[in-house]
Image: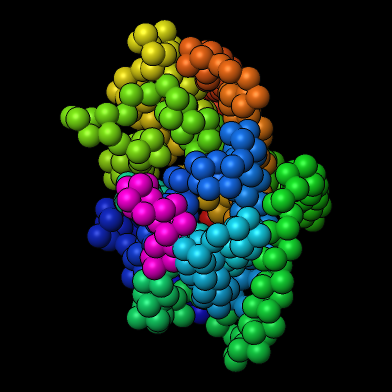
Amino acid sequence: MTAYEEIVNPHEIKNGFWHMPKTFYTIFFIEFWERFAYYGLQAVAVLFFIQKFGLKEHEATNLFSSFSALLYALLIIGGYLGDKVLGFRRTYFLGIIFLMIGYGSFAFVQNVQLLYWSMGMVLVGNIFFKTNAGNFVQRCFAPNDPRLDSAFTYFYMSINLGSFFSMIIVPFVAAKTSYGFAIGLCGVGMFIALISYFILRKNLVKSDNETGQKAGNKFFIMLIIAAIAVVAAYALGLLLKDPALSKTILFTVVGIVFLIYFVVRSKVNAIEQKGMTIAFLLLAQSIFFWLMYMQMSTSLTLFTVHNVRTDLFGINIPPEVTQSFNPFYIFLLSPILANMYTKSEQSGTPISIPSKFAFGLLVCGFAYLLLAGSCYLSDSNGTISMIWLFLGYGLYSLGELLVSAIGLSMVSKLIPVRLSGFAQAIWFVTTAFGQRLGGMAAGYGTIDDTKAVSNFEILHGYQMLFAAIGITATVFAVIFIIFVKKLSKNMQDVIGEISK
């Protein structure tokens, strides 16, 4: 049984947000609350580590980048459980439970041991949740449905709608109460997601994969997996205590997963091999995007603390709130791009994914060059106007929509549908690798706590970091643009053969 009806004539399909399958809206709403929780944590995590536990800036950025990388690197486990063991729906449910407990426990964090356990619970919850959310979106649509790119863009909009509100609410609550209490509120968001799951469960049952639909009663297996997951959460918490070891394990996992990727590639037919080759090239390109993405919660936040004037109409805005500029732009631009994609598909002149990736990377590079240039306009205190940060986030967010929002759609189109869980996991492993590299890069901009440094020295350090990132991204983007036409044609050939 499938969750969709085969599309005979794609031109007859209505586009727009209000013309999606019912399951899509279920996932959209639950995803809103899950992302509310995660981005609430992201907004304040680095400053939480510094102010509550006395970590140095480079230690705080290192810890959060390790956490973020592991968050994505281990998703292949969730993909396997969803594909082969429990089905999408049951794995998704376990994710909601663990995330609710993990985020909620931050309200009671008083020592570093409990901090690591709470982070471990969030890591495990994300393993269960993330890939299966993306898989549900894909299961809503027939392979030749022209709404797929738009659906993933709207799905991305739900992510950023949730993050927009949390990145404003959580920092303000933290300023009035405490960081731990503010993050604990994210657990309330996951409780709302849990209630939503039960209310809208019938839509998830309809769109579950064959493993989930034919599984029967899996209560005891779910109980065993949950018990193992609790132990794994403790182990992952311990791993976060050792950044060097976590980095080694992460890079080892990345290497193993991509080795598996090429082994799998060697066993599929010729046209599928071609598709997986194109996917790999685009995945490699996305690594640098994720390096830039990680700056948002690390170097850009610390840059804002030290070198950005955050007063607005006499109100002092918490530095963490500036991260909400990103989801604000995403929410603003997503419907425009989604409709553009659908109309271009229906007119017979689609905008290719390689084009989106290459130009997205270019625009992100321009964003960091703008930020580097704005440092020349600093005042006598070594600070710049918040408007430059706002404009930089605007450019970056446009680039993000052209890369990250389309990434899940890209792997779903180029990697065989029978490997959908693995395809989602590959995208997230690439994300993990890029984010960990981003955390390492962010360390070059942080201050040396052992020396007295002026605000201008701090400004110069971040200027050099942003300039290096911007120049490198621009150069890579130009190289990829040269090969866009060839990649686009090959991708079109692959999708045409698969859809026959």
Give x and y (percent) for residue 343: 30, 43
Give x and y (percent) for residue 245: 79, 47
In the image, residue 197 above or below residue 363: below
Residue 361 appearing in the image: yes
Who's the residue at 46% across and 46% down the image?
A: 44
Q: In the drawing, does residue 497 fall left or right of residue 147?
A: right
Q: In the drawing, does residue 152 fall left or right of residue 458?
A: left
- Specify the color scheme: rainbow
Residue 186 appearing in the image: no
Is 78 colored magenta in this rendering? no
In the image, residue 35 above or below residue 46: below
Q: Quadrant of residue 49?
A: top right
Q: Which residues are magenta?
A: 171-189
Give x and y (percent) for residue 436: 65, 39
Q: Quadrant of residue 363?
A: top left
In the image, residue 292 above or below residue 254: above
In this view, the residue in front, 227 or 312, is: 312
Who's the residue at 30% across and 36% down the image?
A: 317
Is 184 colored magenta in this rendering? yes
Magenta stretch, overall SS: helix
Q: In the drawing, does residue 376 fall left or right of residue 390?
A: right
Who's the residue at 38% across and 17% down the image?
A: 383
